[in-house]
Amino acid sequence: MQLTFTGTVVGIVFYNQENGYTVLELETQQDGIVTCVGNLPSLSTGEVLTVTGTLVAHKTYGEQLQIETYVVSNPTTKQGIIRYLASGLIKGVGPKTAENIYNKFGDDSINVIEADPSRLATIKGISINKAMEIGNSIAELKKMQEQIMFLQKWGMTTNLALKIYNVYKQSTKAVLSQNPYKLIDDVDGVGFATADKIAVSMGHDLEGEFRLRAAIVYALKDTAEKQGNTYLPLDDLFARCNELVGLDFYNLGQIVQDVLTKLVLEPTIKLFDIDGKQCIALVRYYSLEHAIATKLLKLNREARPLMLDADVLIDTFQKINKFTFHEGQLAAVKSAVVNGVTVITGGPGTGKTTIIKCIGQIFSAAGLRVEFCAPTGRASKRLSQSTGKDAKTIHRLLGYEFSDGKMNFKYNQHNTLHCDVVVVDEVSMVDVAVMHSLLRALEDGSRIVLVGDKDQLPSVGAGNVLADVIKSRCFDVKYLTYVYRQSEDSLIVSNAHLINAGKMPEINNSSRDFFFTQKDDLAEVASTVVQLVATRLPKFTGVEPSQIQVMGALKSGVAGVESLNVQLQSTLNPFVYGKGEIVYGKTIFRQGDRVMQTVNNYELAYVKPLPNGAMEEGQGVFNGDIGFVTKVDKLAGSCDVTFDDGRVACYAYNDLQNLQLAYAITVHKSQGSEFDVVVVPLLNGPPTIINKNLLYTAITRAKKVVVLVGSKRILAMMIHNNYVAARTTLLRKFLQDEKLRFDKFFASTDD
């Protein structure tokens, strides 16, 4: 329930200048002192505030009002005016000067300063320059508060209003009055619905150019970020736009055509035909996929021949490692030696890691510079352990840097990587933006080896790189089908392949690593998952509860990821008096909690202790990074998170919006990771999500033990549901078209 209080600010307990997180004490006539927390602009003691928000009962700090909106007024009493002027926010005014000002002008002091600050020079000790400085300080403070209150008038929370103000500063009102849809591009977390609500409430034309333009661009961005599509047929785009604006784009006729023409000329979008159907793409994604196709074909065509005896080197590797390759694996290794671009794909237990290790040793023996990389920190760490080489994330390999509000890579087309071969593992989760950045940093004549499982979920980001490269048939693709024999009581690998083939797994619970627990009731599913993680599996496996990963298909529901996180947190890391915790929205972050970063944040600083005692400093935490809350500063509204690779990042209050509890995570968020023990609740849901592809991905994340909890009916339903959301992407077409063009060009040259 929302409550409103009016009173005088008597104390600023804490204020974070970067994000506006504030803890203040408000003295009210009826309710006494009310502690208020929230994101606010600079405030002074003595100011009169009217705040609206929700009371939150904190076990340690008592009741606090979580501020959603506020209105500031000038103080009207002697004590309030002096306190306000002497708060420290007004340059050149201390307690004595504040008292002198009040003694001269009384209750009219602030009005005098705002209207004619030069009158302050009539007070002993205040020069005309100092008087104008005081006037400017108050004017700046008022301008900021006016901008925030202007934003609140259109239904924005203080948190969002402050984020917008921090982008536009004093131009906030002017920018939004002209085109509120700029918020979508300029302010993180603002989508079309929010910008449109503001625009409509401000009286902007429902059929205006700004609104229609924003709908088109947003729909294309949204489908790329949420569905992975890099383009849409025009009919599909208009259908999405119709939902956004509540208008029929076809009936708008010339208005829409004019908007499309301007977007093409900017250029923001690209119009083209595929099989006679008109399509539309953002220029960004169109260009990325075209550049990927061109570079891959160039690398494959121009790879430098290697003067080495691959058979001898492979034989040496097998003898040293006491290992014999199957013919399919031998072919994969030889392909990497011969070709500029090689694709190696296969499921669990098919020897992908061993092949990577062998390829690395062969190239190193030939004196070539080899780099190993993967999309995520966990995947690169696993690659390092299995190959004995230093594997990096793709971002780290490229030397990511954040400056001028943008993320840039040190290595690019102008400053290429100093290597001859790049091996990319878990390539199924690499999107077009990352693949483009990697390829443009490769020297001409170098090689790239792409390794992944084509049957796992595609990348979270836009595109379908691995699938498109394979389907293009432009490169040598090696399919690993031979599964190395597992021990008789081990079923993870064999069951994963059964599921991938659309067959029921063996679930007699006689193995040592694959188990199924029958539960039909969702509440029982949830309680069983909690019991397994808290007690049963730690006793059976020796793995700590904090290292057991729950993976679900759905976020909501009794046994969904969000509910399971709350239940697991209360069981594994309950409230203890004195243990630090901080509330952000509906989530409690407590010291000791397992957490995950949910978006790429290239700005967030970190430190990392090194073995030699030095401290590495850097920027950047990434989507899917998992760690633990190791420190909570309640007063500052911040917490420290130590990630699995040793990086320690301090999360300010606003940064917490991109952090979530990670006792349970979605299967999509697990990509590129491996966990000793995995627990999977089986839930009914949309066939677009509850399918074989998702179940297969979840099971292949487990190294030692996997436990499925649910009903056999849902298990069978998932296994027999082959639905995979088709992504509309251009890479396959570009590869085939470019190869045809290359082949024709070189054929004519030969003639």
Image: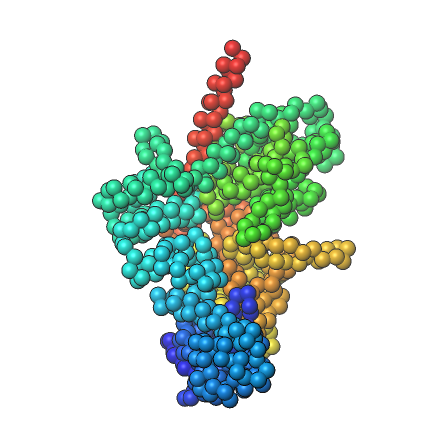
Q: Residue furthest left?
A: 251
Q: Which of the 4 quarters of the picture holds residue 360?
A: top right
88 vs 574, nearest the viewer: 88
**Could you tell me residue 184's position as x and y percent?**
41, 54
**Could you tell me residue 412's position as x and y percent?**
60, 39
Q: Residue at (57%, 34%) from the top-left corner?
A: 344
Q: Residue furthest right?
A: 612
414 vs 121, nearest the viewer: 121
202 vs 644, nearest the viewer: 202
Q: Which of the 4 quarters of the picture holds residue 334?
A: top right
Count of residue discs: 0
Q: From what the image shows, is residue 599 above or below residue 568?
A: above
Q: Which residue lies furthest to the top in this view?
A: 751
Q: Residue at (43%, 80%) from the top-left corner?
A: 111
Q: Can residue 436 be seen in this view?
A: yes
Color encoding of the figure? rainbow
**Could you tell me residue 23's position as x and y percent?**
52, 75
Which part of the image, by quadrant, shows the N terminus?
bottom left
Q: From what the image shows, is residue 126 above or below residue 217?
A: below
Q: From what the image shows, is residue 265 above or below residue 142?
A: above
On screen, residue 180 versus residue 100, left or right, reads left
Q: Residue at (38%, 78%) from the top-left corner?
A: 3
570 vs 149, nearest the viewer: 149
**Could you tell me residue 221's position as x and y percent?**
41, 47
Q: Which of the 4 quarters of the picture holds residue 330?
A: top right
Q: Can residue 487 be seen in this view?
A: no
Q: Residue at (54%, 42%) from the top-left corner?
A: 434
On screen, residue 615 versus residue 640, left or right, reads right
